[in-house]
Image (cartoon, rainbow, N blue to C red):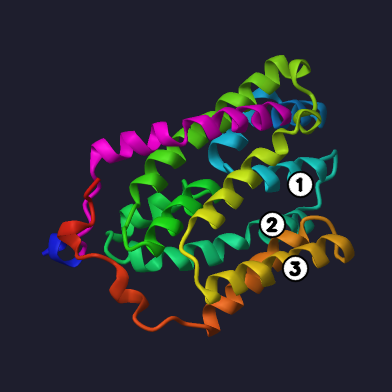
Amino acid sequence: MSASLYPYQFQPHRVRAEFFRLLPISLFVVAFGAAFGLAAIQKGLSPLESILMSTTVFAGASQFAAVDMWGTEVSVLPMIAVVFAINSRHLLMGASLYPMLKDVSPGKRYGLLLLLTDANWAVSAQEYQSGRRNLEVILGGGLVLWLAWMIGTGLGVYFGGLLQNPRALGLDMVLGCFLLAMALGGKKSPRILVAWLVAGAASLAAWKWLPPNMHVVVGALAGGVIGLFWLEPGAQDRVTKPEARHGD
């Protein structure tokens, strides 16, 4: 009965393939993990605390924000508000994945979302627009990015002086370029183009006039509103039948 309720079955060979598919991106995640490890140590966290934070939280931008607010007296409520604001885009990302996740049992579903990042979400969302379900990229890609983040944090904790400012090398642009390539390579339609344009314009305006990191939230909400109210007819019918979903 469980199999009939939740027909999506993960394919181990595809999980491995998606692990290696996102391996190049993970190398840049190591660099930013090293920068975080160094920042955490400089703020007074112990090596163990820094590595445990990356292992359990796995949220780059919000971890940097939390460490920036760290001190002898930590204001917990403002820190919670900042972290929630930065990560609120995951509300929309998770909602966009629901058509795929509804065929996965609740235990696997919520476990899978622990590995959700901008990169593996972008790949999965792009392929879903083309009528192919690919949750293996969330699992396999998320695992390699999570491992890279932990390894990078460890390197930063113990060898942080080797890479104190990855932005000086332009490494902060890598993920942005990857996501842009996903957007440009995906399916084109007036709805999608308008959503990207509105999200980009809103994000730029928020970056200029609102507090730091708010542009991430504003851009995601603006694009999400377009997707919410501008529905394409027959959107659910574009996904292939379960028996054809796992073809390579």
The Cα atoms of the two marked residues, 3 and 1, are separated by 24 Å
- Give whichever of 20, 8 is nearer the camera: 20
Q: Earlier in the sequence, mark 3 or mark 2?
A: 2
Would residue 44 be found to the left or right of residue 25 on screen?
A: right
Image quadrant where residue 162 sits: top right
Quadrant where the image shows the N terminus: bottom left
- Residue at coordinates 70% horizontally, 64% vertically from top-left? 200
Boundaries of the magenta span: 6-35
Q: Is residue 231 above or below residue 134?
A: below
The Cα atoms of the two marked residues, 1 and 2, are separated by 9 Å
Circle 2 is placed at which residue position?
Answer: 86
**Horizontal and vertical percent position of residue 244:** 18, 58
Circle 1 is placed at which residue position?
Answer: 65
- Residue at coordinates 77% horizontally, 56% vertically from top-left? 213
Amino acid at pointer 3: Ala
- Residue at coordinates 85% horizontally, 65% vertically from top-left? 210
